[in-house]
Image (spheres, rainbow, N blue to C red):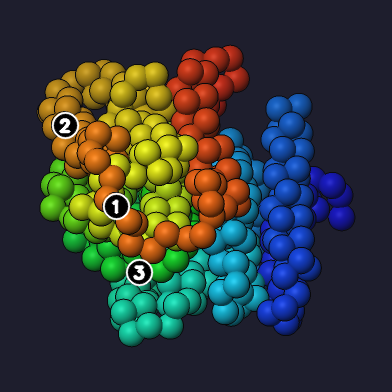
Amino acid sequence: MSWSQSLPLLILGSSLLPGLIIFLLPEERVITRTTLNLAGAVVKIVLVLAMLAGMLRGEHYQAQLPLIAGLDLMLRATPLSMLFLLLSALLWLVTTVYAVGYLENSPNRSRFFGFFSLCVTATVGVALAGNLLTFLLFYELLTLCTYPLIVHRGTEVARRAGRNYLAYTVGGGALLLLATVWLFTLTGSLDFREGGFLAEVDASLHPQLILVFGLLIAGLGVKAALIPLHGWLPQAMVAPAPVSALLHAVAVVKAGAFGIIRVIFDVYGINFAASLGLMLPLAALAAITIVYGSVRALFQQELKRRLAFSTVSQIAYIILGVALAGPIAATGGLVHLVHQGVQKITLFLCAGNLAETLGIHHIEEMDGVGQRMPWTMASFTLGAFGMIGAPPLAGFFSKWYLGLGALEMNQGWVILILSGSSALNAAYFLPILHRAWFRAPPANWPAERNLGQQETAWALLLPPLATAVMIVMLGVLASAPFGLVEWAGIIADRGFAP
C-alpha cells in the first residue's frame, strides 16, 4: 500500500488505537492514559499537516476498502475535507489537555477517554469520507460514541438528556439512511464529486431529488441544530465541560453543518441545487434559526444553556452562507465553520473553569469574577466579542463576507438578519461581561478550590488562552496569503465552477 493510500488510514488510526487501549487501562494508570491521549492527538496533527503539505505539492490521498457490492469504504482528502479535518485535529488537542485537567480524580476516566478517542476517530471519518455511504457510517458512529460522554455523570438528568439525544440523532440517522438508499437506487453512485454527481441525471427524476434533498437536510439538520430539530442540544449541557466543547465546537453540530455543505457542494452541486429551487428555502430556514437561537439565548440564566442557544444561532450562519448560492457568501459560511469552532470552544472552556474552580453555573453568580479569574474572563471576553462580530476578531470576517455575499446575490434581507443577530448577540453577551468586570465580587465564592493565589489549574487555563489567541490571529491574518479566507475562497470557487 502506497503512502498516499496509507496516510488517511494512519490519521484515522492515530485516535482509534489509543482509544481501544485506553478502554483496557485500570483507573489508576493515569500517566499511561494521559500519555496515550496526548500522543495520539499530537501524532494526528503531525499527520494532518503532512497531508496538507503533500496536497499543496499536488499529491492526492485516497484509501478504499471493499464494503458491499458496488460500494467501497472510501477516505479521500479534498480542500473541503482538509478544512474540517485540520480544525478538528487542532481543537481536539486543546480539548484533550483540558479534559485531562478537568477530570482529575474523577471516576470512570478510562471509559470517558476511550469514547473520547472514538469520537475523534468518527469525526476524522466524517471529514475524509469520499462517498455518502462512508459519511453515513462514521456519522452514526459519532452518535453512538458521543452518547456515553453525555451520560458520563450517571445522574437521572444526564440519562434523560442522553435518551433525548439518541431519540433525535437516531431518528435523523434513519432519514439520512433512507435518503442515501434512495439516491443509490436513482443514480447507482454515492461518490462525492466537486460540482456534484446529480446534475446530469434525467430531468424526470428531479421531483424525487427534491424529496431526497429534504430528507438529507432533515437528517443532517438534527446534529446541525436547525429548528425545529435542535431540542436535544440545550439538554445535553448537563455533560461535563469538555463534552460540551466537543458537541459545539469540534464534532457533533459541526459534523451536521459539514454534512449539509457536502450535500450541497459534492452531491447535488450548488448550481444544480439552486436550479431546483432548493437554496432559498434552506437560506430562510437558516435565517429563522439564527434569530430564534439568539432570542432564546437572551432568556437563559444558566451560562451553558445560554451558550447552547448561541450555538443554535451561530451554526446556522454556516448554512446560510452556503444556501445563498454565491461564492462570496459561501466563503463566509466556510470560514465560519472554523471561526465558530474556535470561538465557541473558548467560551465553553471558560464556562467549565468557572464551574470547576468557583462553582459558578448561573449568570447571576458571575459578579466580579473577572477580578478573581482575569485570564479566564479575558479569554471569555474575546470569544464573546468574536461572536458579536467585533473587528478585528475572527467572527467579524465571517459576517463581513456573509454580508458582501448577500449583496452580491441581491438578498438584502440577509443584511437585516445579520444586523439583528449581532444586536441580539450583544444583548446576551454584554450583560455577562458587565457583571464579570464591573460589579463587586461576593465576600465568598460558592465552592472555591484551594488554589492559593493561582487562578485555576494550569491544564484548565492554558487551553482557553490558546484558543483566545487563535480568535485574534484568525482575524488579524484573515486576508493573509494562503490564509483561511483564501482557502475557503478556493473551495467556494471550485464548487461554483461549471
Q: Which amino acid does label 2 sit on?
A: Ala
> Closer to the N terminus: mark 2 or mark 3?
3
Q: Name the residue under label 1.
A: 443
Query: What distance separates the C-alpha of mark 3 from that of mark 1?
Result: 28 Å
Q: Name the residue under label 2.
A: 423
Image: 59 above or below 359: above
Q: Which amino acid does label 3 sit on?
A: Val
- Residue name at image x 60 percent, y 48 percent: 458
Q: Which amino acid does label 1 sit on?
A: Ala
- Residue name at image x 56 percent, y 22 percent: 483
Where the N terminus falls, by quadrant? bottom right
Q: Which of 271 and 434 is in front in this view?
A: 434
Going by the image, does 41 lie left or right of 368?
right
Image disc number at residue 238 = 3
Provide the secondary structure element on which disc 2 rests: helix
Query: What distance separates the C-alpha of mark 2 from that of mark 3?
Result: 28 Å
> How dense is the environment of label 3, judged by Cα within 10 Å: few (below 14), some, or many (20 and up)?
many
